[in-house]
């Protein structure tokens, strides 16, 4: 998988950038995000990536409070980091009346999950967690199929500034515990390694 970036005018405002993101006709099936002020267009992820996201999604649905939702294609806005990000999974409690029908403020998310793809793993390891921590999202789960030491799942929490603390890590095959309000143990042995 490879990504295409679209540069914008340096003096464009956040609102202009979001309007461009919302109104442009992007290739069907692609994932279009604004990462650190740059619009990034990626092809749809492959089967192992989707299987991993689906298995996590299924576990989360059984563990969340009734008023929360689990999404796989919901954009979250982090204007302070010039980010309009689409995590592989977002768990959020939505307000009764949304300000936008294309995205939600990142502060509404309780957990975000990213499953790395080979070509853009850096975003999931560096740029996105900095944005998620800045927004105060309590938990970030990184499922890194391309980690240098082999596939891993790492749970981050306790955001401070743009940094998270590692709450737990597991090599594929080992369990990984998500704390309250999830109180859930993920079996990372269910995740495809390739």
Image (cartoon, rainbow, N blue to C red):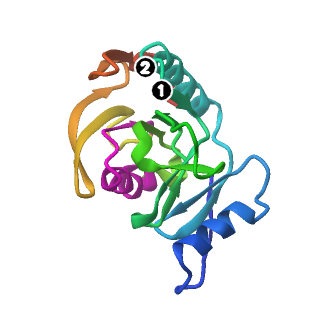
Of 192 and 167, nearer the camera is: 167
Measuring 57% from the left and 24% from the top, which residue is drawn there?
54
101 left or right, relative to 36: right
Q: Which mark is residue 81?
A: none
Give residue 68's mark: 1
Q: What percent of the width, then of the height, locates residue 46?
A: 65, 37
Q: Position of residue 44 (x, y in %)?
A: 68, 44
6 versus 54 height, above or below: below
Of residues 148 and 112, the one drawn nearer to the viewer in this rendering: 112
Task: Identify the image quadrant of residue 78.
Answer: bottom left
Q: Name the residue beneath numbered marker 2.
A: 64
Q: Residues within 10 Å of mark 1 (few under 14, many from 20)?
A: few
- In this orientation, which residue lies closer to the viewer: 34 or 121? 34
**17 shown above or below 46:** below
Residue 181 in which image quadrant: top left
Q: Are marks 2 and 1 in contact (CB under 8 Å)?
A: yes
In which image quadrant can residue 109 be found? top left
* Number of numbered discs overlaid on the protein picture: 2
**Which portion, as a residue range, is magenta?**
122-145
- Is residue 47 on the magenta stretch? no
Write the residue at 40% across / 47% down: 107
Q: Residue at x 23, y 57 (%)?
A: 161
- CA separation in Å, label 2 and label 1: 6 Å
- Residue 128 is covered by the magenta coloring: yes
- In the structure shown, which secondary structural element does the residue marked by tag 1 occupy? loop
Q: Is residue 47 above or below residue 61?
A: below
Which residue is most to the top? Answer: 62
Q: Is residue 89 above or below residue 131?
A: above
Q: Secondary structure at mark 2?
A: loop
Give residue 70's position: percent from left, percent from top. Answer: 53, 28
- The residue sitting at 39% across, 66% down in the picture is 80
Q: Is residue 153 left or right of residue 190?
A: left
């Amino acid at each position: 998988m490879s990504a295409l970036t679209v540069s914008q005018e340096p003096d464009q405002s956040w609102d202009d950038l979001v309007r461009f993101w919302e109104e442009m006709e992007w290739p069907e099936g692609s994932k279009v995000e604004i990462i650190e002020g740059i619009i990034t267009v990626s092809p749809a992820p492959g089967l192992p990536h989707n299987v991993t996201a689906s298995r996590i999604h299924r576990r989360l649905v059984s563990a969340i409070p009734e008023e929360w939702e689990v999404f796989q294609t919901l954009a979250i806005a982090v204007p302070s980091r010039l980010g309009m990000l689409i995590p592989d999974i977002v768990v959020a409690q939505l307000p009764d009346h949304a300000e936008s029908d294309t995205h939600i403020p990142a502060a509404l998310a309780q957990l975000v999950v990213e499953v790395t793809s080979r070509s853009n793993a850096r975003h999931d390891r560096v740029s996105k967690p900095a944005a998620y921590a800045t927004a105060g999202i309590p938990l970030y789960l990184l499922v890194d199929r391309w980690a240098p030491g082999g596939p891993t799942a790492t749970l981050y929490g306790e955001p401070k500034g743009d940094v998270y603390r590692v709450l737990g890590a597991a090599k594929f095959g080992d369990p990984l515990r998500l704390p309250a309000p999830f109180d859930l143990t993920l079996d990372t042995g269910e995740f495809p390694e390739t």
